[in-house]
Image (cartoon, helix red, strand yellow):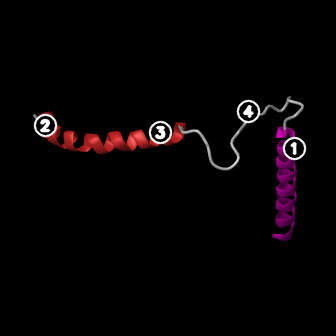
Amino acid sequence: MIVYRAVPYLVLAAPPAIMLLTILIGGCTMTRTAGEPVQQAGFYSDPNSRAGEALARELDRREARAALRRVIDEVQP
């Protein structure tokens, strides 16, 4: 009997829920057109890829964070 009482509420809640899911799924699958669109997938092994530079920058950032963490730990008693 409880299921029969919930049906009108489910009917009222279904259209907004479907619309919200449609917007979320559509936004996740939309292609990027503004700014600098991606020409092709970048691989680290590709000779013309800039992914290696990004990897080097990330490793430098991690090293700088580790050095900063060591300095902070040395200063704190």
As drawn, is 12 to the left or to the right of 75?
Answer: left
Whole-Å distance between the Cαs marked 2 and 4?
54 Å
Dot 2 alpha-carbon crowd within 10 angstroms: few under 14, some 14 to 19, many 20 or more: few
Whole-Å distance between the Cαs marked 3 and 1?
33 Å
Return the x and y of residue 71 as percentages of the image width and height. 87, 64
* Mark 3–mark 1 CB contact (< 8 Å): no
The residue lying toward the viewer, choosing from 39 and 65, is: 39
Q: Which residue: 18% across, 43% down? A: 9
The residue lying toward the viewer, choosing from 68 and 61, is: 61
Dot 3 alpha-carbon crowd within 10 angstroms: few under 14, some 14 to 19, many 20 or more: few
User: In the picture, which quadrant includes the C terminus?
Assistant: bottom right
Return the x and y of residue 41 as percentages of the image width and height. 73, 32
Q: Which residue is mark 1?
A: 53
Q: Which residue is mark 4?
A: 40
Q: Earlier in the sequence, mark 2 or mark 3?
A: 2
Q: Which residue is mark 3?
A: 26
From the image, state whether disc 1 or disc 4 is nearer to you. Answer: 4
Q: Which residue type carries mark 1?
A: Glu
Q: Was residue 75 drawn as part of the magenta stretch in this picture?
A: yes
Q: Which residue: 86% across, 29% down? A: 45
Q: Earlier in the sequence, mark 3 or mark 1?
A: 3
**Residue closest to the far left:** 1
Q: Earlier in the sequence, mark 4 or mark 3?
A: 3
Dot 1 alpha-carbon crowd within 10 angstroms: few under 14, some 14 to 19, many 20 or more: few
Q: Which residue is mark 2?
A: 2
